[in-house]
Amino acid sequence: MSDLPYIVGNWKMNGLRGMLSEARSIDRASARYPKVQVALTPPATLIHRLHEAMQSIGIGGQDCHAEESGAYTGDLSAQMLKDAGADFVIVGHSERRAVHNETDAMVRGKAEGALAGGLSVIVCVGETEAERDAGKAEEIVAGQVEGSVPRGKGAELRLSVAYEPVWAIGTGRVASVDDVAAMHRNIRAKLVSIYGEAGSGVRILYGGSVKPDNAAELMAADEVGGALVGGASLSAESFMGIVDAASQKVAE
Ligand code: PGA
């Protein structure tokens, strides 16, 4: 797994063809940052178009089914995403866990399906506000990592983990840098307990209201290997502000 900072824009359920020009701007600007790995996850309907139009950034899906094919109306397999031009997929986003009742076991199944389908995978974890207030954040997140990450030979080589506190997503509220660093160390310890020393190479991204003006301090925090960005990835200007902040980390 690369150790370049990894900045992933998650467009969620946003984006019609008109958004291709924004993606093109992001792609062109990203070519000037060879020390930052940049990717977008558009809605599945745009994966193929982005794949054809992009030159310097990665393209991913926002979810996949655990199985390769079958009678699962409305679902998409990892093979289909790859066929459309994706090279990775996000699984276990808190919106999927909350709205589609996805459990850790389901997320792990999807992550393993993604790897079997030839994709890399970003597994999302994160506590709710009530869990943090109850002093249980580290325990909850460690449990999600244990239950959600893919197993199998070399699984950790194509894995990133995104720590996204649910209360920070789309709210403008960001976890403190100290809390982020502490949680990333907690996740690192869990990854090493699962994969052995190889777990120290898995990138851990932070997500939740990352913006150009807070990205530099978040990216500088201990064990933060990049960012998963929602709202701020919908405009090239704000997204590239975050990519630029990540490039400063490399320059340090
Ligand atoms: P946000 O979303 O940056 O809009 O908070 C992050 C995410 O959900 O991945």
Image (spheres, rainbow, N blue to C red):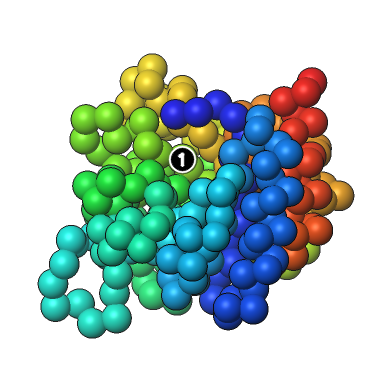
As helix, strand or loop, the secondary structure at mark 1 comes to: strand
Q: Nearer the viewer, residue 183 or 34?
A: 34
Look at the picture and state if 154 lies above or below 51: above
Residue at point 20% right, 77% down?
Answer: 72
Residue at point 44% right, 75% down?
Answer: 45
Q: Give percent across and percent down for residue 167.
A: 65, 62
Residue at point 24% right, 51% down?
Answer: 117
Q: Residue furthest right?
A: 213
Is the shortest distance between ligand 1 and the CB of mark 1 under 8 Å? no
Q: Give percent across and percent down for residue 76.
A: 30, 70
Q: Give percent across and percent down for residue 111.
A: 31, 51
Q: Nearer the viewer, residue 43 or 109?
A: 43
Q: Residue furthest left?
A: 70
Q: Amino acid at mark 1?
A: Ser
Q: How many marks?
A: 1
Left or right: where does residue 59 sit relative to residue 101? Answer: right
Q: Nearer the viewer, residue 107 or 70?
A: 70
Left or right: where does residue 216 sit relative to residue 175? Answer: right
Within 10 Å of the Cα at label 1, are there few (<14), some (14-19), or many (20+) other Cα atoms? many
Residue 247 visible in the current orientation: yes
Q: Which quadrant does the N terminus fall into?
A: top left
Q: Which quadrant does the C terminus fall into?
A: top right
Judging by the rendered image, the residue that carries numbered circle 1 is 160
Q: Give percent across and percent down for residue 231.
A: 69, 66
Residue 168, by quadrant, is bottom right
Look at the picture and state if 23 lies above or below 155: below
Residue at point 30% right, 52% down?
Answer: 114
Residue 210 visible in the current orientation: no
Residue 221, by quadrant, is top right
